[in-house]
Image (tube, rainbow, N blue to C red):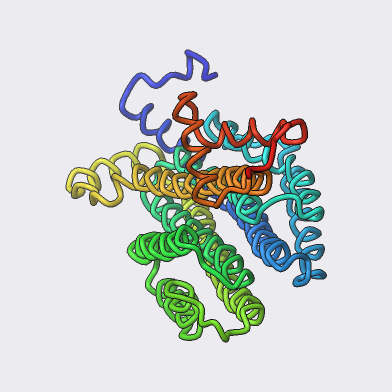
Amino acid sequence: MRNVADHPTDALGWFRFARQQRRRQLEAGLQVGEWASQISHLVHMLQRERGASNIWLCSGGQLFVREVPFCIAQSDEQIAALRQRLALPDPIINAAIAGRLACALWYLDALPALRSRIQARSIEPEAAMAQFSQSIGHLLSIVPEANDTLDDANLARALTALYSFMQGKELAGQERAIGAMGFTRGDFSDPLRQMLVDRIDGQQRCFGTFIALAAPELAAEFREQGEASREMEQLRRIACTRLPPDEETAGLAVRWFALQTQRLDKLRETEERLIAVLQQAAQAQLHQETENNEPDEAAFSRWVQDHACQEEPAALDRHLLPLVRQQARQLETLTRQLASLQETLEERKVIDKAKSLLIRHQQLSEEQAWQQLRKLAMDQNKRMVEIARAMLSVADLWPITPKE
């Protein structure tokens, strides 16, 4: 807490205070860059583990037998590095960042249990993907919260370009995982196909924001290396229409994963350069502030003259934080949609099992079994899945007489 005696009382005193705060902001900018780099490394490894796990699950443990343990080891290495950093005090961690960190760590703590279920093949790929995506989403959400620690327009602009890019990369990672499921199974259901389309559209919006904010050379690098290749676009069209019956879908899955991984690795390189731009901007301005030995009175006089004729900041710079918040909400919405889809798929499986039970014991047709479940649900004012679960829980005790 600042001492009352140090409280500014005149214009020059407030100017000195402003210079001190600016130095702190620039130092925070350097730390934000370090945080972003650490999170970026961990997210990249979790993205790869998510995609590899999906292929392994969908292939019944036949594909990516060696790749999954390798991905796990890389993820764990980055998780250990994050925990080591968290053991040190960090002035940029405000209440919002601390809350996001708590959620991220909760999901990271749940990773061993998730991996055990994947290894036992006791979890559906959609559920595994949803849990990975929630972990990644909470990690990524730390980056826009750091924008609260930055007042400098150039640093806020660089951070917004970085977060937009990181979010686009995560949607590309989700695209890889979704496509891996469909190609490995040899089928893209309508919900799965819609999820794929949503991720492709989301990437375009995020990368569009990045291009508008980033330096021209970084935007050009993305267009050259980060855009989807022609072969990837062909596989997208196959996934978004219908798989040919004579295609070797396992081969398509491996090829899809390889192409998407190559692209994500290129995106990772650009991401590192964006982080470097943020840190270099903060470092250059901090160096200029530190090396400036101009007396406060002279510096204040020049500062007043410079700002007397300064134009109104561009709307883009003044509204960067709301833009970042909006993009963070979009990613959270897509993650919730994935979890909702998984819940729907699980409920459908329970209902199908109950239908099979009725078909087997009462010799009903599939349509008759469905109608009976529906009638029971309506009579008891309950959801059909609740009736199905109750039916399955006592299936072994039913004294059901086969229908004559």
Residue 289 picture location, percent across and down:
47, 48
Residue at 59 percent of width and 49 percent of height: 130
Residue 86 picture location, percent across and down:
71, 39
Q: Quadrant of residue 295?
A: top left
Count of residue discs = 0
Residue at 45 percent of width and 62 percent of height: 190
Does residue 35 appear anywhere in the picture? no
Does residue 251 appear anywhere in the picture? yes
Residue 229 picture location, percent across and down:
48, 82
Quadrant for the N terminus, please: top right
Determine the residue located farthest toward the front in the rendered image: 404
Q: Quadrant of residue 223?
A: bottom left
Q: Is residue 218 left or right of residue 9?
A: right
Q: Quadrant of residue 89?
A: top right
Which one is in front, 344 or 379? 379
Residue at 50 percent of width and 42 percent of height: 146
Q: Is residue 75 left or right of residue 341?
A: right
Q: Is residue 23 left or right of residue 65?
A: left
Residue at 76 percent of width and 71 percent of height: 64
- 38 is higher (above) or lower (below) than 57: above
Which one is in front, 248 or 399? 399
Which one is in front, 369 or 159? 369
Quadrant for the C terminus, please: top right
